[in-house]
Image (spheres, rainbow, N blue to C red):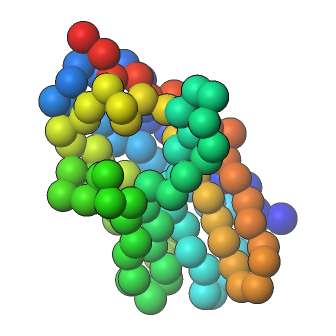
Amino acid sequence: QVRLVESGGGLVQPGGSLRLSCAASGDISRFNTLGWYRQPLGEERALVAVMTTGGTESYADSVKGRFTISRNLKDNTVDLQMNGLKPEDTAVYFCTYRQYPNIVYWGQGAQVTVSS
């Protein structure tokens, strides 16, 4: 079992910044992927950004150049710095842990609302 605890999120005006953090605990594999997905209201959950233990990053095209993922391997934490936020970034953001071949865990979700 892996537990994911998220923090951050909230309400921000367009163009503003927010930071999400996620701490993983439990049966953590030496090789894994930590990161973030998001789910706008009424839509499917989709990739935002993830990073492997080897340092490989993947971003959704819609957030490239605005969002930055970082992780601390020692503490098993992953952060998402979100700059230049837009109304279309409004969603529930979920921390995710993935381990080969098909192990997936999700956090409880953090609401991010971008509105003036």
Q: Position of residue 42 (x, y in %)?
A: 63, 28
**Which residue is more in the foreground, 47 or 13?**
47
Question: Is residue 77 in sight in this rendering?
Answer: no
* Residue appearing at x 38%, y 75% in the figure: 57
* Residue appearing at x 66%, y 72% in the figure: 98
Question: Is residue 103 in sight in this rendering?
Answer: yes
* Residue appearing at x 21%, y 42% in the figure: 83
Work out whether 87 lies above or below 108.
above
Taking the view exactly as shown, the residue that stands out farthest to the right is 1
Asked whether, in this view, residue 14 is left or right of residue 73, the answer is left
**Which residue is more in the foreground, 96 or 73?**
96
Q: Position of residue 20 (x, y in %)?
A: 41, 43
Work out whether 31 lies above or below 2.
below
Q: Position of residue 89 (x, y in %)?
A: 37, 35
Considering the image in quadrants, where does the C terminus appear?
top left
Q: Quadrant of residue 102?
A: bottom right
* Total tally of numbered discs in the picture: 0
* Residue appearing at x 83%, y 65% in the figure: 1
Asked whether, in this view, residue 23 is left or right of residue 100, the answer is left
Work out whether 49 lies above or below 106.
below
Taking the view exactly as shown, the residue that stands out farthest to the front is 43
Q: Quadrant of residue 11?
A: top left
Asked whether, in this view, residue 59 is left or right of residue 29, the answer is left
Taking the view exactly as shown, the residue that stands out farthest to the top is 116
Asked whether, in this view, residue 19 is left or right of residue 6, the answer is left
